[in-house]
Image (cartoon, grey):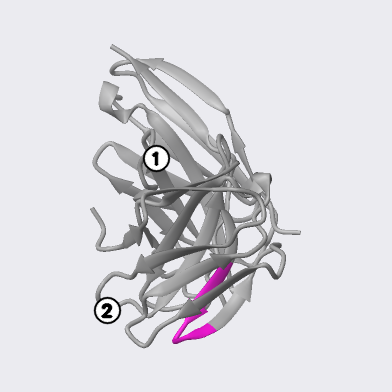
């Protein structure tokens, strides 16, 4: 069945360092890959997304890369700040009648000041 | 913040009871998806409504049902509540359904506790 694996489950970095979170998806028909940030008790917030016709996308300190052949995609956060601390979820959506999202298990990012 | 709203914020029920959760979609969006997020896990897709019809369902039993109204707001109903139904229920609205990767914007969620 459809599955998204996410690593690591926890990540601790020093303020100013970079953070990388990796995901692997199983459905080769997947064509849309969003990343959500969820602070404790809050809604998931879209921070960046990428579609399968693009290999990389950047928005200020955040970038996402996609390797369709290997079915991998990654989130890169540079110059991390304490306010980046949260749980990050990757997700994948495929070419079906519904644009349902299959989520990874989440990464708890802690940025130490 | 998105324009997606949910009510109520919190709810406490007992086993066997029934519950109705509500979601108002963002303006211009005709599709609402519902997700269940257990503590410490990623959201799990329950079902999606597109133009008032169910348009896809995840691996949830029939006691999870829903509705979408002409203004595209939606309800999630859960009958015969079980302890494992305790979770954060999230709705997400998008401009459309289908395999075009329309962005989904989440509401704040309803925290359901079943005792």
B115 to the left or right of A84: right
A39 to the left or right of A101: left
Q: Residue at x 64, y 67 (%)?
A: A29
Q: Residue at x 36, y 88 (%)?
A: B70
Q: Which residues are magenta?
A: B47-53
Report whether mark 1 lies on the same chain as mark 2. Answer: no
Q: Is residue B53 above or below residue B14?
A: below
Asked whether residue A67 is in view, the answer is: no
- In the image, residue A1 lies at what x, y percent? 76, 59
Q: Quadrant of the C terminus of chain B?
A: top right
Q: Secondary structure at mark 2?
A: loop
| Closer to us: B12 or A38 | B12
Q: Is residue B61 above or below residue A33?
A: below
Numbered label tally: 2
Q: Is residue A9 above or below residue A41?
A: above
Mark drawn on residue A50: none
| Closer to us: B67 or A66 | B67
B53 to the left or right of B79: left
Asked whether residue B105 is in view, the answer is: yes
Give neighbour class at mark 1: few <14, some 14-19, many 20+ (Cα, 10 Å): some
> What chain letter is assigned to the residue under label 2?
B
Q: Is residue B40 above or below residue A81?
A: below
| Closer to us: A95 or B41 | B41
| Closer to us: A34 or B91 | B91
Q: Separation of disc 1 and disc 2 at Cα?
A: 24 Å
In this figure, which residue is indicated by the disc labeled 1? A38
Q: Quadrant of residue A88?
A: top left
Q: Secondary structure at mark 1?
A: strand
- In the image, residue B76 lies at what x, y percent? 51, 67
In this figure, which residue is indicated by the disc labeled 2? B28
């Amino acid at each position: 069945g459809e599955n998204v694996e996410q690593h690591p489950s926890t990540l601790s970095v020093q303020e100013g360092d970079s953070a990388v979170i990796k995901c692997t998806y199983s459905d080769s028909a997947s064509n849309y890959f969003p990343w959500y940030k969820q602070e404790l008790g809050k809604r998931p917030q879209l921070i960046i997304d990428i579609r399968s016709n693009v290999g990389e996308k950047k928005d200020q300190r955040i970038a996402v890369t996609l390797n369709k052949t290997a079915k991998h995609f990654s989130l890169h956060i540079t110059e991390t700040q304490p306010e980046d601390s949260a749980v990050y979820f990757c997700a994948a959506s495929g070419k079906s009648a519904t644009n349902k999202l299959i989520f990874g298990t989440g990464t708890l990012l802690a940025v130490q000041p | 913040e998105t324009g997606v709203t949910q009510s109520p914020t919190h709810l406490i029920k007992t086993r066997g009871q029934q519950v109705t959760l509500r979601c108002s979609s963002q303006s211009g969006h005709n599709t609402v998806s519902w997700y269940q997020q257990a503590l410490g896990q990623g959201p799990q897709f329950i079902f999606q409504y597109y133009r008032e019809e169910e348009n896809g369902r995840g691996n949830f039993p029939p006691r999870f049902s829903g509705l979408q109204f002409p203004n595209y707001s939606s309800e999630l109903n859960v009958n015969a509540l079980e302890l494992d139904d305790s979770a954060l229920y999230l709705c997400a609205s998008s401009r459309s359904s289908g395999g075009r990767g329309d962005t989904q914007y989440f509401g704040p969620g309803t925290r359901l506790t079943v005792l």
